[in-house]
Image (tube, grey):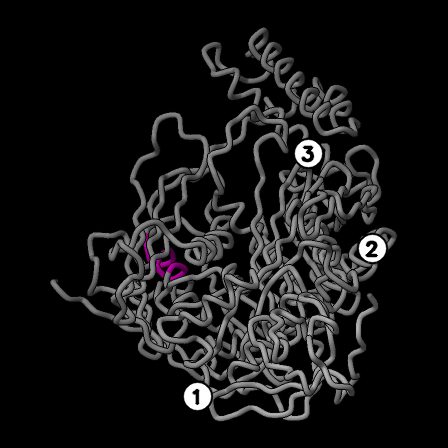
Amino acid sequence: MLNNKKEFKLNYGGKEITLETGRLAKQADAAILASCEGTQVLVTLTCAKDVNDGQDFFPLLVDYKEKFYAAGKFLGGFMKREGRPSNAEILIMRLIDRPLRPLFPEGFMNETILMAQVVSMGSGDPEVLAGLGAAAAISISDVPFNGPMGYAKVSKIAGKLTLNPSRAEWDAGSLSLLVAGSADAVLMVEGESNEVSEDEMLEGIVFAHKHIKEFCKLVDQMVKEVGVKKREFTPVTPNATLMTEAMKEFAAEARKVLSTTVKQARTVATNDLRKLIKTSLKASPAKFGLEADADFGKEAAKVTDEVLYKMMRADILNESKRIAGRGLATVRAIETEVSVLSSVHGSALFTRGETQVLAAVTIGGKEGEQMYDSIHGVGYDKFYLHYAMPPFSVGEAKGYRGVGRREIGHGNLAERALKKALPSQETFPYTVRVACEVLESNGSSSMGSVCSGSMALMDAGVPLKGPVAGVAMGLIKEGEKYKILTDILGDEDHLGDMDFKLAGTKDGITAIQMDMKIAGISEQIFREALAQAKEGRMHILSEMAKTMGTHRTGFKAGVPQIKSFKIAPDKIGALIGPGGKNIKGLQENFKVTIDVAEDGTVKVLGVDVQKLDEVIALAEMQLNGPKIGAVYKGTVVTIKEYGAFVDIVPGLAGLVHVSELADERVNDPNDYMSEGDVISVKVLEVDRFGKIKLSAKAIEPLKRKAN
């Protein structure tokens, strides 16, 4: 049939969500048009029927694209066609991908592409629709998948949790979460909050999961009515003989690897173990259940990973012993420094074990704002964090080819953690950039970036609500038995079941991110992980406080500062002048930057505080004139026989007549002053032509200079 349209509806947070299939993109393996309040997202799934030769990983690609025509907009800039994805789109791709990936069966390696395109933009949230559409598309397709699962956004407004909030509600919430889960467990959490407690955070997650369960019921209904039979897929059966013999043969060497404290030495030991295993497999293939023509290099890599996996997990579960003997809740040794870089506005170096991050802060005004253009409109970020993790940080001999999706995600997490501790724009009207350079990495460089970024901001004099620290947690779970790990290493992340990052101040959580590599965790495990993470965070904050516990009271020399004043909106044109002549002159003469808002707020940015005061005084004088009776410290700029011209502010002069210089008769003003002298003057009159008459003797009569 040309059109076999079928719709499924669900009330999701008081808003009707519709999932339509059977009408669009019918040559894809599955296609869903997800709609809510005028927003429509087309999600398509295609999956290769065969596995590429030599394929040894699951090539899943999630793509999310905002089509500007969806909002009736033209794309800004020279190119009017959508090109490479924006950072915001990349972050959404990651959010969709992360909880889906662990639900594909082990060993499934067919190339799989999920594409979500926003084709109509109303008031509904396209991000949620993209996630829901992706989850439904996989479930109704023939692709093997351990679903159903779903996504939910939650915001807390005025103490009340709201499902599927509007964009404004999401931005204004004291707690904003995106949660993904199956009917039985939570799979992913991503969010930020205004220093909320662990109980509030868990409340939001449980609330979201309750509604995800309702979505999973809808997907089950869709599978029954429009789903197709899953394709034949036979997982590769593990070679039991290989693993049994390997555990016996190489246990001692594997133990040496896990007992090695230093990461690079452990990497060398792991490589040596792999070479030993390859040699042994090649020498006696039958003993290990292999054919004589097997790919011994590939088999050795699998065996190495599996032996270390089983041994490390057994150590933790049975003996509560981690790599190199560290305790489950022990945070590695921490070292901190500030003002590491001599010429930047603020800097800090944070080292935790073998993870080291250098952070640098730049403070400026409007010219530093980061503009972004999306289907939601044009906006400007006044705070942003850039994260870079070059290959040398993990000892790899590679060139650096720019920021990848992973770095964008890690930087965004650190940015959200710090953003919630920043002062308001009303009290701190600056643009702030934090650059985090990962110099070493062995476990959670994103949380290291939170710590180094927080200290660099305080070093720059940014008045944070409080220092912010982050910690990465892990999980090892077999059946009902589990152990939670604090401050995980890279190897523990690779071989573990959970990557859970949590950041905040001493008063509460500011950002959270959790990814599961298994089919989710229970509320009880999550509660314990939150409590253990709080202990770790408090310890890290106490270590940071030994170097810097609060922000500097002022900026360092050379840091631009902003001073503001207010003018009537109808005087904005006069301040700017014809063709911008006046405001350009002020900026050039005083070496400042002036920004004028529509409401008449004028912000002046510059390095020299005295110049800021002078330009503000001059601008106010230009617009309002000097006040009659006001007293100023003025500079004598020109002396004539009839008096002296005195700048009451740079560039605005008045005349002190000879009769207003001293109590006695003055024949020659040069006998009483010299050009460049600073004298106190009082404004007597401003005539209708704007000429200013001043008096010195009304304040302090001048005395004749000594010969």
Closer mark to the observer between disc 2 and disc 3: 2
Of residue 434 and residue 649, the one placed in the foreground of this image is 649
Image coords of residue 147 (percent x, y):
46, 57
Q: Which residues are magenta?
A: 134-141
Measured in 3D between alpha carbons, the distance from the residue under mark 1 to the one under mark 2, in whole angstroms, is 47 Å
In the displayed structure image, the side of residue 510 where residue 548 appears, left or right: right
Q: Residue at x 65, y 67 (%)?
A: 420
Marks 1,2: beta carbons within 8 A: no
The total number of labels drawn is: 3
Q: In the visual, does 87 lie left or right of 9?
A: right
Determine if the magenta segment contains residue 136: yes
Secondary structure, mark 1, is helix
**Residue 634 in the image: above or below residue 675:** below
Question: x, y percentage for residue 524?
Answer: 72, 63
Mark pair 2, 3: CA separation = 42 Å
Q: What residue is disc 3 on?
A: 310
Decide: marks 3, 1 in contact (CB < 8 A)? Answer: no
**Residue 38: % across, % down:** 31, 77
Q: Sequence-wise, which precedes: disc 2 or disc 3?
A: 3
Q: Which residue is mark 1?
A: 570
Choose between 178 and 45: the one closer to the eye: 178
Q: Under tag 2, what secondary structure?
A: loop
**Relative to 464, 111 lies left or right:** left
Residue 188: image quadrant is: bottom right
* Left or right side of 553 for 190: left
Residue 174 seen in this snapshot: no
Q: Where is residue 132 drawn, in percent x and y?
A: 41, 65
Element class at badge 3? helix
**Residue reaching furthest top?**
283
Circle 2 residue: 548
